[in-house]
Amino acid sequence: MKPAYPLAVTTGQDIWPTPHRSTSLYSIVVQLAAAGQGRFPATLGRAIHSQVLTWLQAGDSSVAQAVHSTQVSPMSLSGLVGRRRKQGTRPDDEFYFRIGLLNGDLLEPLLAGLDTWGTQPISLGNFPFVLRGVEALPGEHKQVQIGNYHLLSKTSPVSDDLSLELRSPTAFKQGKKTIQPFPLPELVFGSLLRRWNAFAPEDLQFSQIEWQGMVSAFDLKTRVLRLEGGPQIGSVGWIRYRFLDAEQARIASVLAQYAFFAGVGYKTTMGMGQVQSLNHA
């Protein structure tokens, strides 16, 4: 396993064990290899989430408890990415998943937990895997990035036309029972604004906004993600938004870049809502 990324990082904000100090954002990639032969479930969102919490627990139990208890998750998680053979997975087939960290203080305990785990077997959906490596430095993997709230808040150029690619099913909870699969601007940027304000330094937080953006073009289709708790419907494809208000365009431009780390909508810790800006791809 590769050595932990060499940063001195601390932990927490609000319910976190110590005051939040890092303003960094991370997207890291966990590389796995199949350790068995056969088939595993099409989606492993709950299993991946549980495994990441186990690694955090190994790195710092108080941080893991804080992450588990918070209402706004400081992480986003992709599904398992890799080749799915028609005849079934074979030993040493390679897979990966991505972890987005909205609180940079989580990096050190997460990497410490991964390092402690070492070569122990990993079970996802009752299928065995082994840890092959962790990519945490930009340039090692196309999905690895490092960001910063201060730098993102100065996103330039500002655009009144913003395009997003929805890479995994994306949907939004409206009320207690209604699920909206179409990414309306107020739902997309409202979701991102809530996450930003939950973890950005206080001086960088935005006031609440009545979004006045409009959808100018899209190519979307609905897709079912069969999670352990039942099937979930969301949209995948691309969509373009237009903001006529200059200040809303500025904030939306910032949040569009933030989406890569944060995810959009609900169940972003289960593989849903994986989104990337097409303006600064």
Image (cartoon, rainbow, N blue to C red):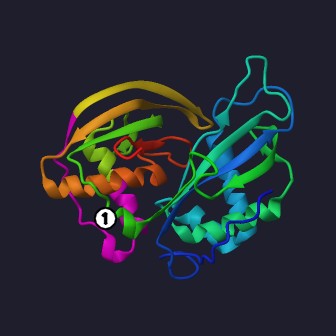
Q: In the rendered view, tell whether residue 78 sits above or below residue 118.
A: above
Q: In this view, does 251 lie to the left or right of 30?
A: left
Q: Is mark 1 on a helix, strand or loop?
A: loop
Span highlighted in magenta in the image = 191-215
Quickly name the residue at label 1: 154
- What is the crowding at mark 1: few (fewer than 14 residues within 10 Å), some, or many (at least 20)? few
Tell me, yes or no, whether the highlighted magenta stretch contains residue 210: yes
Q: In the rendered view, tell whether residue 180 sits above or below residue 154.
A: above
Question: x, y percentage for residue 148?
Answer: 44, 66
The image quadrant that residue 205 belongs to is bottom left
Q: Is residue 20 left or right of residue 47?
A: left
Question: x, y percentage for residue 277?
Answer: 38, 44
Which residue is outermost to the top?
Answer: 86
Question: x, y percentage for residue 96?
Answer: 68, 42
**Residue drawn at (69%, 45%), measured in percent from left and top?**
47
The image quadrant that residue 115 belongs to is bottom right
**Residue drawn at (86%, 38%), measured in percent from left and top?**
35
**Residue drawn at (79%, 44%), measured in percent from left and top?**
123
- Say which of 238 and 194 sits in front: 238
On-image quarter of the C terminus: top left
Which residue is outermost to the bottom?
Answer: 18
